[in-house]
Amino acid sequence: MTPCTAPRFAFLRRIALMLICLCAMATGYAQPPVTTLSPQATVSVLTCAPGSELYSIFGHSALRIQDPASSLDWVWNYGVFEFDTPNFILKFARGKLKYYVLSYAYSNFYAEYSHEHRAIEEQVLNLTDPQKKRIFDALLVNELPDNRYYQYDFFFDNCSTRERDVVANALGADLKWNPRTPNDYGSYRDLIDPYCRNDVWADFGIDLLLGLPTDKTADERGATFLPDELLRAFAAAQVKVDGAWEPLVLKQQTLLDIPRAPITSFQFSPHIVGWFIFVIAALVTFWCYRTRRAGRGFDALLFLILGLLGCLMLLFWIGTDHKATYQNLNMLWAMPTHLVFGIMLMVGRWQANVGRYARGVMFWMISFVAIFWLLPQGFHAGVIPIAMAATLRLIWMWYWSRLKS
């Protein structure tokens, strides 16, 4: 951990970063100082390394245009949103928060990522003057007040895909992608997993909330929602220049060289907590069997938590615009109905209904634990012991209801 990332400096870092961003935004709301480019102008793609905050762990991309003839050196950033938006938190959670493109001086962009200790890689594109002009004009049009806002989607419409589309639309048939072997990208879930290795609890939460769309196999276009994949796609692409196909990237260089943080070797992970819960459930079940007790307190807490998780997943499925949270099969084990069941256990009433619920859901949970690996959605390994713990307690409650009947 470098001194600037130590916890005691976290507050000062956020204040400094806020000032840098405000400076960039103040500069950016003005139009670029020129509206035409000279033959000396260059267009490049900037790829920024992942950061330490959750919102930045997947990296970032931006487009840069330089023109020595007019001293232009500006960046177009599609990852901006307004903190003072009414109902900001609610709109963010529901996927209704509007993002927009903002242009500002490259010096401010560099200062921001230097302060965050995040490397910047630049790919200067091999373009003709008319191709550069089409990209520049598209950026100017996108930044007009009526055009600058867009509905952000993490996988399908984000800061990386927007820049891909600006370049692709401007070049049209003059651009040729050279993708890797088909199906070599894996699923969207496979693509984001490596970025969560230093934050295992964020990985756990993401896997809980993301549904079936995340397990679709990504193609060369879909994979470019990640800035690193966009960098690789541009590096392999070709552009037609004067009738001949040439590499799209003329030059690649490191503008800010900062090593990425190493992967933490050991963390107190959800896997450990999941197996701890299962061991506790097994010990409680053994104690209940020996003492002929119901163990209702533990069961109430367990199923209340699982039910709340299920309700949260259901809310993200039907109550938000996040496409990746639809059809979440995690609700096969964290059922919203568990919440009602937990309340029934907590108040200690409706004993007959407790037995009926335990009997009905018990077989469902046994089936899930037995065949989860055959389902089309990937599940975090930490949920399996938790599902096993719930299954074990349901079996006991069914057995207990038979003893008392």
Image (cartoon, grey):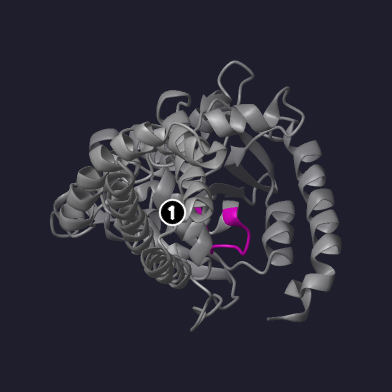
Which of these two is toward me, 147 or 362? Answer: 362
Q: Which residue is at a point 47% across and 56% down the rendered structure image?
A: 295
Q: Secondary structure at mark 1?
A: loop
Asked which quadrant contains residue 142, the reply is: top right
Q: Position of residue 272 (x, y in %)?
A: 45, 73
Residue furthest to the top in view is 146
- Residue 28 left/right relative to 61: right
Q: Residue at x 41, y 41 (%)?
A: 161
Where is residue 404 shown, x and y percent of the image? Answer: 34, 45
Residue 167, position as x, y percentages in the image: 39, 40
Quadrant in which residue 323 is drawn? top left
Vertical relation: 259 (above or below) 29: below
The C terminus lies in which quarter of the figure? top left
Quarter of the picture containing the N terminus is bottom right
> What amino acid is labelled 1 in the image?
Ala
- Residue hosting label 1: 294
